[in-house]
Image (tube, coloured by chain):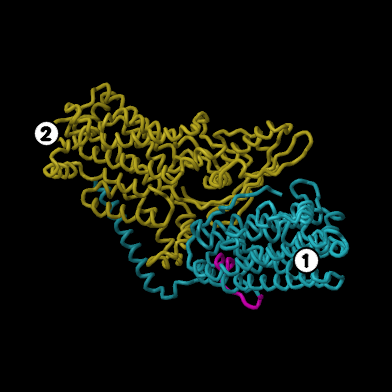
Chain colours: A cyan, B yellow
Amino acid sequence: MQLMKKWYLTAGILMVALTTISISCKKNNDSPSDNGMDRKPMLENYASNYIVPAYADMVQQLSTLKTSIEAFTGNPDATTQAAAQAAWRNAYITWQKVDLLEFGPAYDKSLRTYMNIYPVTISKVEGNVSSGNYDLETFGSKDAQGFPALDYLLNGTTLDKYTTEPLAANRKQYLLAVIEKMLQKTTEVRNEWNDYKTAFISNTGTDAGSSLSQMVNNYVLYYERYFRGGKIGLPVGAMSGVARIDLTEAYYTQELTKELALKAMNSVINFYSGKSYDGASTGESMKSYLAAIGTKDDKGTLIADLITQEMNEALTSIQNLDGTLQNSIQNNRTAVLNTYEQIQEVVPLLKVDMVSAFSISITYTDNDGD
Amino acid sequence: MKQKLTNILSTQHFGKPVYSASLAVFRIVFGLMLLFSTIRFWAKGWIEDLYINPKFFFSYYGFEWVKPLGDYTYILFIVCGISALLFALGLFYRIASVLLFLSFTYIELMDKTNYLNHYYFVTLVLFLMIWLPANANLSLDSLRKPKLSKRFVPLWTVGSIRLMMGTVYVFAGLAKLNSDWLIEAMPLRLWLPANNDMPLIGPLFNHVWVAYFFSWFGALYDLTIAFFLLNKKTRPYAYATVVVFHLMTALLFPIGVFPYVMMVSALVFFDTKDVDKLLQKIKTIFRALPVNSVYNNYTFAPIQQRLVSTLFVIFFAIQFIMPWRYLLNKEELFWTEEGFRFSWRVMLVEKMGYAQFVVKDGTTGEKIAVNNNEFLTRNQERMMAIQPDFILQYAHHLHDYYQQRGIQQPEVYATVYVAMNGRRSRLYADTTVDLAKQADTWKHKNWILAFNDNIYGL
């Protein structure tokens, strides 16, 4: 009994002591509460300095593309075709900075399915051209429109199909319909972001519906499925063991494929580190938030820095591939598989380490592996 | 020995008569809590999400035969809900308590993905309650059969519930005595900032010292609270602490009804005399209440008493041993989770994983990358990726599935990455081991790769 009393006393004193320490600590600590761990500035930076300008630019690029496609269909010759091809190329490069933003309004609109599902299914495109009867709004049309369809129609189709061929009028019509749909959807997303921005910034929680969770989930999903899988994994056959260059992005403009992948990897890095859309400034980001939380590897390196390091190595690895991506896959598949491995290194760091440190969870459903 | 046991259970010791009011009140609040919990579970659509929609269920070792019952699973929950209500009302108590124990336990055994320490706690308490005269007071049974109505019960009846509560708290506290929790303030250091947008106290969570304070206070609380609740002088403060502490955890973490279960369960620590007084007072207002006001004792028949007390001694012996079984394995417990469950390791580790399975045709060498979501729900996948017994069960399932699909001698390989308590993720399982050939035993699984770090303490 005596012992019990002593035990209570000790425990009681400890509790009081701890409380006192905590209160005095609180008084001494006059620094502002924001030590890089507040999520609002991060969301603010992403929304104002990246996402909103990104969609504005995308709409701009698509408008330019639309104008040149109209010029081409109005007067199809080599000059107008080349101009349309150039505008398409610019817009496609810009898209690589926007594709990773499929959350919020873009998610609601399924923007990607109108913009960049590849490979394009030629039979669908040709079927639509010849029948003149199609609905690009439907999910089934996702592989008959967007940049890949334009690639086929502008770069994989000879000029005579727009001039002398009996279906030329239909084909021009289809070309216009595709760019019109892309512009319409992107404009809708841009407009909705103007309203959504405030809600996005103020939803500072970490639950499944929070801005951070949605953004991170879709960013990681993009990296894993659409970047790693779509751009490199599936074409090189990392999982299946069978190389399929027909699955590459921009298949009809093969000198562009690697550039698109590089641009996308660059965007992944810039977005992670909080660079503004124009690249001129840097603000609060997933990286700075992760650094503030401060998780480290066993050598004492911040996980936040490790991710940048691994991402840069992936970027270099893509840069070092010789010639077009299609050439590399056919002639030096091992090198591309190594690049894939390098890209893969980042996946657990994002999907496990970062997500775990953020106390959120991966909520998206995995698609097929690659 | 026999003599000793009889002695211990005599009216001077554990058999001392105490007011039955405590046990009765505990029965009511616990039963209502379970009724509420069942309704909540149903209302959230979890029966469908967790027990009807999934195509595959992770079963407990030795309980592979316990499976969801398809649409009849709803009936199981109806049985559970109704028996919880009867349990609370004290109507057909013996049958109700058995049914409640069985249905609740069956539900828990259907898929270990949904294992929660507090569900396990409920199961154990329900098991104890089956044997106790909790319907002796404030029950419809005592109206139905006035002979059942007793004002006093032996101390050990209430005592065993208190001991159960104390066991949970103390072991939860012991589990926190490790270097990650105390020295690194992990995982609270990660979990608290996630709540830094809470009004008023939110900004506090940006400071590491708050994580330390919560870690140390949490450990101290768990280790000592049962003793403070037992002591008459400290009890009111201790109970206030219980309420504040569990409200805090309810606010911070998605742990459902657990905080409330503990808050109401801790009422059992109050002096039975005071509870009785309160009931007598209430009876002066609500006269119809079946509150016993005469001086009569509930007595177990000697053989019954011997049986139940032996059962309880075995029960608690198991409870005291279970949390230590991890000592049989040399590897880090938090990493391998071998001996982690049923040990009151509550909200102790932040762990996240990612598992990519590949099935290889043993004859052609052809490989198939497995899409986990064809087989598992998001939640199942999340649990699977960090626990080796899940990984094995899943690997065996994949083997069987692909064999049926005509793959010859399927081999199953997995690339699993796990990050724990802020450490960098590392490869968890040997990628060269055909998991379909590994058996799930109680021995250490050699294909789990080394943790390569040390966590000191218990």
In three-dimensional space, the C-alpha distance between marks 1 and 2, rounded to whole angstroms, equals: 90 Å
For mark 2, name the chain. B
Q: Is residue B203 or residue A250 the one in the foreground? A: A250
Check residue B294 in the rendering and tell me which mark sits there, or answer none.
2
Residue A50: horizontal and vertical position, in percent?
61, 71
Total numbered circles: 2
A283 in the magenta segment: yes
As helix, strand or loop, the secondary structure at mark 2 comes to loop
Q: Quadrant of the N terminus of chain B?
A: top left
- Front position in the image: A329 or A183: A183
Q: Residues within 10 Å of mark 2 (few under 14, many from 20)?
A: few
| Residue B294 percent across, percent down from the top left | 11, 33
Kind of residue indicated by mark 1: Glu
Residue on which the image places disc 1: A259
Q: Inspect this view and state whether residue B15 appears.
A: no
Q: Residue at x 75, y 56 (%)?
A: A132
Which range of residues does the magenta coloring cover? A278-291
Determine the residue positioned at 60% across, 60% down: A109
